[in-house]
Image (cartoon, rainbow, N blue to C red):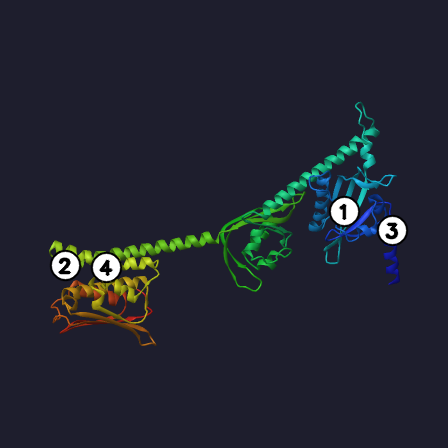
């Protein structure tokens, strides 16, 4: 313990006694320590600096002299904090405060060469920045200013050293500006971008689009396997790292977990994995870029489904129209009566189509279908009673045709052909263990009707739709007051 303390005291004493200026900043860029040489150079006191924000002391006002170099100084500090690596400013023009013999405060032009070194804890985190500065003002002032031949000593002490320092500093500034520009472009790119390091594919860089893909989980520093689990993309990444050949994919499905505790779901990704090489052309990492195209894939799937459904509906509708035309022609020899009957049945089909279109072909309820097909006969002469029953599009079309035939027959021969006649339609759900829909069509106060000697098209259409399309049963009887029809349909079976 005493030896450790003694070593610490020796280190502090050596730091303070060094003729080279040193100062120590914490992560907030506030002064945490400095040696006597630094206090002598800056003409400051320890009490004045400890805890102060460095740019409050040495920053220059925006637009004023020295502002550009002040920005460079702060940028160098920030770079050390972000990267964990040392940073160098080959040449920094920065005046320091001095006092004239009469006591007034003056500022003297000075040139400095600075090294900023990160101080890290046991976890490798930067806790402080150590600045070492060298005053190179005399070297800069020693540059020959007159024209004429220069000696080797002049070139070494003056122009050559200064010129090389300025060239290095200019290159550093250019490279830093390019690095910031590239970083901004990658961070704000619309597609996701990531940089993976080493054979385990450790995530070193991840832009905003990449974070959105994983619901802003903190994946920086994790391996791809830890962040995304075992999936096919690991095989692709391993191939790139081992062979040095890029890999590209389109609309590949990846199972991504958007939150630490939430479920994973499939996302479709366009991606490109490209090798990152060192100066010896050895692969040291993988550059990842791509786009989440899930919305595009899902839209294409929805469009295909809609086209398939449209084709199915068009074929069914054409088949229905063809059947209506053939059957109507058999029972109507007169062209005019054929045209009237055919048009009425097409209009019934159209009415139900209109009803379904309003619901985007998601279906319709039974009452709405009945109201559409019987509206022309007067709402006061029909009584509709029953619960809400949702119908699929196919079942709505079939029942719409059935109700049209019943209403047409009632208007021609049954209750609706007589002034006092009425039609009642009741429906309910029966047999709840295997639910069925029961619909009863009853005509009252109409003329006396008798069972027809032959089955007409309307009867055949009703029976075919009920038995084949709706997989149900129908029982039609003729009373002294009109037609009575009882339908039983499986409730859950779609056409």
Q: Could you tell me if residue 303 is visible in this image?
A: yes
Mark 4 vs mark 1: in front: 1
User: In the image, which is nearer the foreground, mark 2 or mark 4?
Assistant: 4
Q: For this view, does 178 lie left or right of residue 253?
A: right
- Residue found at x 64% / y 41%: 178
Sequence-wise, the earlier of marks 4 and 1 is 1
The circle drawn on residue 348 is 4
Where residue 221 sits, quadrant-wise, is bottom right
For the N terminus, the quadrant is bottom right
* Element marked by disc 3: helix
Numbered tag placed on residue 21 in the rendering = none
Q: Earlier in the sequence, mark 3 or mark 2?
A: 3
Q: CA distance from mark 2 to mark 4?
A: 20 Å
Distance CA(mark 4)–CA(mark 1): 88 Å
CA distance for labels 1 and 3: 26 Å
Q: Nearer the viewer, mark 3 or mark 2?
A: 3
Q: Secondary structure at mark 4?
A: helix
> Is 49 placed left or right of 183 in the picture?
right
Q: Dot 3 corresponds to which residue?
A: 14
Residue that mark 2 sits on: 330
């Amino acid at each position: 313990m005493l030896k450790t303390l003694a070593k610490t005291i020796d280190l502090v004493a050596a730091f303070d006694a060094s003729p080279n200026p040193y100062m120590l900043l914490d992560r907030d860029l506030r002064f945490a320590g400095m040696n006597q040489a630094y206090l002598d150079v800056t003409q400051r006191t320890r009490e004045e600096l400890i805890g102060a924000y460095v740019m409050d002391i040495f920053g220059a006002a925006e637009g004023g002299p020295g502002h550009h170099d002040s920005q460079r100084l702060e940028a160098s500090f920030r770079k050390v904090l972000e990267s964990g690596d040392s940073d160098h400013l080959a040449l920094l023009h920065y005046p320091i405060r001095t006092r004239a013999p009469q006591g007034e405060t003056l500022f003297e032009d000075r040139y400095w060469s600075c090294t900023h070194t990160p101080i890290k804890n046991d976890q490798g985190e930067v806790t402080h920045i150590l600045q070492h500065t060298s005053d190179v003002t005399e070297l800069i002032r020693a540059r020959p200013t007159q024209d004429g031949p220069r000696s080797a000593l002049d070139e070494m002490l003056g122009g050559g050293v200064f010129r090389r320092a300025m060239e290095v500093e200019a290159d550093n500034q250019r490279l830093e500006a390019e690095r910031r520009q590239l970083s901004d472009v990658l961070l704000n790119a619309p597609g996701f971008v990531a940089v993976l390091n080493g054979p385990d594919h450790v995530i070193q860089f991840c832009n905003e689009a990449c974070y959105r893909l994983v619901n802003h989980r903190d994946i920086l520093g994790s391996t791809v396997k830890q962040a995304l689990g075992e999936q096919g993309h690991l095989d692709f990444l391993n191939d790139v790292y081992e062979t040095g050949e890029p890999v590209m994919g389109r609309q590949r499905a990846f199972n991504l977990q958007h939150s630490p505790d939430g479920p994973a779901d499939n996302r479709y990704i366009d991606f490109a994995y490209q090798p990152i090489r060192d100066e010896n052309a050895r692969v040291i990492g993988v550059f990842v870029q791509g786009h989440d195209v899930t919305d595009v894939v899902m839209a294409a799937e929805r469009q295909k489904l809609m086209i398939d459904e449209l084709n199915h509906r068009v074929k069914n509708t054409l088949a229905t129209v063809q059947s209506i035309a053939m059957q109507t022609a058999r029972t109507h020899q007169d062209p005019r009566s054929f045209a009237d009957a055919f048009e009425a049945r097409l209009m019934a089909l159209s009415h139900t189509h209109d009803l379904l279109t309003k619901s985007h072909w998601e279906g319709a309820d039974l009452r709405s279908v009945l109201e559409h097909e019987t509206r022309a006969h007067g709402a006061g002469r029909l009584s509709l009673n029953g619960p809400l029953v949702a119908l699929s599009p196919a079942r709505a079309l079939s029942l719409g045709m059935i109700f049209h035939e019943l209403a047409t027959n009632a208007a021609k021969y049954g209750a609706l052909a007589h002034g006092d006649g009425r039609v009642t339609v009741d429906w309910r759900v029966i047999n709840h263990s295997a639910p069925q829909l029961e619909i009863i069509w009853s005509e009252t106060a109409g003329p006396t009707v008798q069972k027809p000697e032959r089955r007409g098209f309307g009867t055949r259409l009703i029976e075919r739709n009920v038995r084949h399309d709706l997989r149900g049963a129908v029982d039609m009887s003729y009373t002294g007051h009109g037609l009575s029809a009882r339908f039983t349909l499986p409730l859950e079976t779609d056409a």
